[in-house]
């Protein structure tokens, strides 16, 4: 018996690079049979809180600006405080992705911030299950998880190239892997919950 999970990719994209990753995460969830959709939080008035409440999994995406999530994404986080008070997202599955121009770009700060946000909501965090790529003489820029993250997806997009060029395919494929993994975990947890 299979269960279809409901996944929402919740993101802010300043210049289009995070949206490219969000689309890849979405595709990964769709590829494993999830009912999945994108939700931009660029404008809080566009956030459908009822849809978020009905989802099994929320996958958060933000560019890394100055070592943390972007201001619009942080505004979304702050706006969720009523849900936090009511424990509305407890036991939903969560994960995250981020992108910056630099290879490091302090992206770990953003993923940590998003994982703490999920933990405050009582969510179940799911990171990458991929080994680090491109970390030996036999490695390649084409490796999955080429930036070697485990907490979530880290992607890199050159500052002078648009979203039609970067992030590279390896980063988009890593994002697809995260979307698929989270959708499968959410479906498994839903099946267990329904059987209880």
Image (cartoon, rainbow, N blue to C red):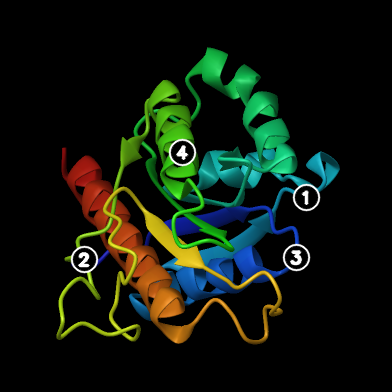
Q: Are the residues flagged by discs 3 and 1 in contact, CB closer than 8 Å?
A: no
- Give coordinates of residue 176: x percent, y percent: 40, 74
Looking at this view, is 43 or 88 the one in front? Answer: 43
- Give coordinates of residue 118: x percent, y percent: 43, 33
Looking at this view, is 70 or 87 the one in front? Answer: 70
The residue depicted at 72 percent of the width and 48 percent of the height is 41
The residue depicted at 28 percent of the width and 81 percent of the height is 143
- Give coordinates of residue 106: x percent, y percent: 48, 45
The residue depicted at 62 percent of the width and 53 percent of the height is 11
Task: Write down the residue under mark 4.
Answer: 109
Q: How many numbered marks have been drawn onto this rendered protein structure? A: 4
Mark pair 3, 4: CA separation:
20 Å
- Give coordinates of residue 110: x percent, y percent: 50, 41
Judged from the image, the secondary structure of the residue bearing numbered disc 1 is loop
Judged from the image, the secondary structure of the residue bearing numbered disc 3 is loop
Label drawn at residue 42: 1
Mark pair 3, 2: CA separation:
27 Å
Task: Write down the residue under mark 3.
Answer: 15
Reading the chain from its start, which is encountered first: label 4 or label 1?
Answer: 1
Q: Residues within 10 Å of mark 2 (few under 14, many from 20)?
A: some
Reading the chain from its start, which is encountered first: label 3 or label 2?
Answer: 3
Looking at this view, is 1 or 76 the one in front? Answer: 76
Image-quadrant location for residue 93: top left
């Amino acid at each position: 018996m299979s269960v279809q999970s409901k996944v929402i990719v919740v993101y802010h994209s300043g210049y289009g690079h995070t949206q490219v990753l969000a689309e890849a995460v979405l595709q990964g969830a769709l590829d494993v049979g999830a009912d999945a959709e994108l939700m931009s939080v660029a404008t809080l008035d566009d956030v459908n809180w009822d849809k978020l409440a009905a989802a099994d999994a929320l996958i958060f995406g933000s560019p890394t600006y100055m070592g943390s999530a972007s201001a619009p994404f942080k505004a979304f986080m702050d706006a969720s405080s009523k849900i936090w008070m009511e424990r509305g997202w407890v036991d939903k599955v969560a994960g995250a992705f981020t992108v910056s121009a630099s290879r490091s770009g302090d992206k770990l700060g953003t993923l940590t911030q998003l994982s703490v946000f999920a933990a405050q909501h009582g969510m179940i965090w799911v990171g990458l299950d991929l080994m680090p790529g491109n970390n030996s003489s036999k490695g390649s820029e084409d490796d999955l998880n080429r930036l070697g993250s485990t907490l979530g997806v880290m992607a890199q997009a050159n500052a002078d190239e648009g979203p039609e060029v970067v992030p590279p395919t390896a980063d988009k494929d890593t994002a697809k892997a995260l979307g698929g993994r989270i959708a499968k975990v959410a479906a498994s947890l839903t099946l267990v919950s329904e059987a209880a």
